[in-house]
Image (tube, rainbow, N blue to C red):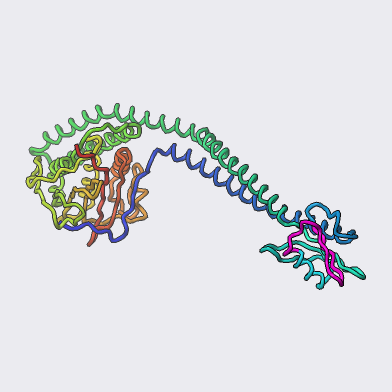
Amino acid sequence: MMARRAVRGPRSIGAQGDPVARAERSIALRVSLTTAVVVLVAIVGAGLIFDRQQLAEIGGRVEAAARTADDVADAPPGVWIVEVTSSGHKATPGTPEPVVTAAVEAADGTAGPTSITAMGRSWPAFVDPRSDRTFVTVYDIRLHTAEEQRLITATAIAGGLGILLAALTGLLAGRRAVRPLAEALELQRQFVADASHELRTPLAVISTRAQLLRRHLAAGAAPARVAEADQLVADTKAMADVVSDLLLSAQLEHADVPAERVDLATIASDVVASLGPYAADHGVTLTVSSRGVGVGADDVRTGDVEPGGAASGGLEPVVVNGVGTSLRRAVLALVDNAIAHSPQGARVDVEVGSVGDEAWLDVVDHGSGVDPDDIDRLTRRFARARDDGGGRRVGLGLALVSQVVRSHGGRLEVAETAGGGATFSLVLPLAPVV
């Protein structure tokens, strides 16, 4: 057996979570983010406007105080006055000494608006020289800083409440907006389930009649007529498979996964035994094996599977919680897909094991591979690859597998097989040991 290596990084495929719930969360998130950006811009804008207006007002206050000052007494609120003369200086009571010193130094400078540095701050000031003295007025910038902080705090609190309110509004709007979508999806699921259920019996009858016709023609009929009968049998079987997929797909959209312990190794053995004749008819060798934890597939025990039998070598149990029939259908779809796209003489390897707390089931083929650009599209109903030349069947296989994986809390990964081909990995949480 070959080790699984991703030539390109593995990608998870299949929707995760209910699409309606994702739409609700997306709308709520978009509304919240938009509101957060608006609130942030508003806070920054309000802060800049407030700062400019306050600084302009402060400049006017210190200039008016300097031009009208006669002494250092009766200074306006928030303003200190320093009077500098040739014999010394006086200051408004309460003026910090470092501010007085810086104001005295500023008195020898240029008249008009200025700023002084003291106590690690910049203080707005105005210098008004007179004939025998100079008045320097200084604004207590701490008042402006405190008021600015109060404004920012209040705006931030209001903005946070606004964002929370917007998130709630977005969630409610999201639910209201996607309600028609949810109802439409429910009607679609119900229609698919009803139509699939009603079609199963007529298709079973048609398939039976086609097989009877094939048996009657087997002896003595022209080869062309026998070939047409064979094609009719194959077509009715393919149609029955599509209807079964439709019915199971509709059921999985709603189904709650019961707590049932399922052995993936047993499912893998059963699927390989069931598809053994089909693989042989296509000239493909089909094998199943178990691998050790965290090692490549070179360290495995391989069970050669006879048609209708189980793995002869015995596989290590890999137990998960889930629906056995759904998981079997998913594995069957992956193996069937691998066989259908493998050339004659190739092999398809089914490897089952565990890594950490995860169960892994790899289906490794050596066919044409999968274009990474097609991965997401191939999990949609009735999709097929763009570069298959029309040879790939239209079906629900990978879409069904994606739904099964989603309903079991796992993921589906795909990687290129070393040497060519594709490796699909069904990854599920391991069941707790009991």
Residue 189 screen position, x and y as percent: 37, 31
Vertical placement of 94 versus 217: above or below?
Answer: below
Vertical placement of 207 versus 388: above or below?
Answer: above
Q: Residue at x 11, y 51 (%)?
A: 302
Q: Which residue is drawn at 90% across and 68% down?
A: 130
From this viewpoint, is residue 49 visible? no
Is 132 magenta? The answer is no
Vertical placement of 248 versus 36: above or below?
Answer: above
Residue 430 screen position, x and y as percent: 24, 42
Residue 176 screen position, x and y as percent: 52, 32
Q: Residue at x 81, y 61 (%)?
A: 91
Is 91 magenta? The answer is yes
**What is the quadrant of the N terminus in the image?**
bottom left
Q: How many marks?
A: 0
In the shown orientation, is residue 235 left or right of residue 160?
A: left
Q: Residue at x 33, y 53 (%)?
A: 11
In the shown orientation, is residue 87 left or right of residue 55?
A: right
In the shown orientation, is residue 399 left or right of residue 25?
A: left
The residue stretch that appears in magenta: 80-99
**What is the quadrant of the C terminus in the image?**
top left
